[in-house]
Image (cartoon, rainbow, N blue to C red):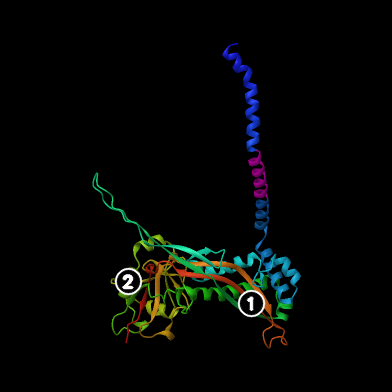
Amino acid sequence: MEVKEIVKELAPVLEKTIKEQVEEWTKEFNTTLEALQKDVAEVKTLSKKTKDWSVSEKREKIGKFFRAFIKGNFEEVKTLSEWVDADGGYLVPSEFHKEVIRVAEISWFARKYCSIFGMSTDSKDVTTLSTWATAYIVDEGAAVTASTPQFGRKILSAKKFAVLVKSTQELIDDNMTNEEVMTLVAKLAAEALAELEDAQVLTWSGAWSNMTWILVDASVNVVTMAATKTSFADVTYWNLLAVKNAVKAKYKKASKGKNVWAMSQDVFNHIESIVDTTWRPIMRESITAPDTFTMFGYPIELNEVCPDDSDDAVSTKFLAFGAFAFFAFGDRKQISTEVWYASGDFEKQIKSQLISERVAWINLIPTAFAVLKTAAA
């Protein structure tokens, strides 16, 4: 029999054998793929359903949660919150958590400018870069000089932040719709927690290990005003220019969009009238967004946790500028809530609601920031 005829006879057998073998090999894979496709389809369906919820429906759900919570209807609370938190408080609906964060990002400092890290445990290692790689000009046939970037490690350690919201039984029962309940509680919680978060980034002092604050951290660049210039009102154009230039350009470029000035309203008032060498004000107000200012091209954020005129003294750091992408802020746990009567409130039917979160913060590269300091006496 010729070779062609042999091949013709064997072809169907080989084809069948190969097909059966391939099916055997891919059986487990196909089963996994089908399960994955099913899971994806379910996620898409759930996602579509969530997207279809109107803002009003989300607020209605959250308002029902808080109304049931204050009234002590914990069966409904469990239904609306899905589960009980390990610390004993009920996790609020995820839409409320997102609303609080959204308000904080829009109106406050820390979540708008810092790098946000999710945390699955109480601590998280964050890699820092203290020395960058270096490039060289090399002659033909010559060896390239090696440069080794210096990496470091810092640890985000979570702390519990909490705010108490008090409300009368009548307020919850009679005078507010579910949407109004949600809006009020979200606003109160967001403002209180965000103010505390801002303080951790800018000004807080304490003995917590691994925690750093820009206006307290001894490792940041410090520009000290000239001798006898001991008051916030003594600040000059040259002081501010020195603060801006104390932060290296590479950090400002790497932190694009998150380079910002931080100061109180009082300090802003002292600076607003300062002009440059051509007699132009160094502060510029946006034409399209009134009450939005820049200085040397970088945005200014007014924050009342920063020192104001009541803090005006010698050797005081009162204004900061930096590449805040190099300040890490960690989210450890979704917001949860607990409720009880505080001492003396039972007879008044005033309930205290504790809303808490767990967060962490640390300055990754101190030299990416600069502060201005009054002179010593």
In the rendered image, the residue lying farthest to the top is 1
Q: Residue under circle 2?
A: 241
The question of residue 32 being in magenta is answered with yes
Q: Main secondary structure of the magenta part?
A: helix
Number of labels in the image equals 2
Of the pair 39 and 257, the residue shown nearer to us? 39
Secondary structure under the numbered disc 1 in the rendered image? strand
What amino acid is labelled 1 in the image? Leu
The answer for how far apart the CA atoms under marks 1 and 2 are is 44 Å
Point out the image quarter for the C terminus: bottom left
Point out the image quarter for the N terminus: top right
Kindly indicate whether the residue at mark 2 contacts the one at mark 1 (C-beta within 8 angstroms): no
Of the pair 365 and 266, the residue shown nearer to us? 365
What amino acid is labelled 2 in the image? Leu
Reply above or below: 98 against 13: below
Residue 202: numbered disc = none
Residue 326 in the image, given as x and y percentages of width and height: 43, 65
**Which quarter of the picture shows residue 355?**
bottom right
Give the magenta range. 27-41
244 displayed left or right of 212:
left
Of the pair 125 and 262, the residue shown nearer to us? 125
| Label 1: how many Cα within 10 Å (few below 14, some 14–19, many 20+) | some
Reply above or below: 140 against 87: above
123 displayed left or right of 217:
right
Residue 304 in the image, given as x and y percentages of width and height: 48, 78
Reply above or below: 276 against 148: below
Residue 309 in the image, given as x and y percentages of width and height: 42, 84
Q: Residue under circle 1?
A: 354
**Which quarter of the picture shows residue 48?**
bottom right
**Which quarter of the picture shows residue 85?**
bottom right
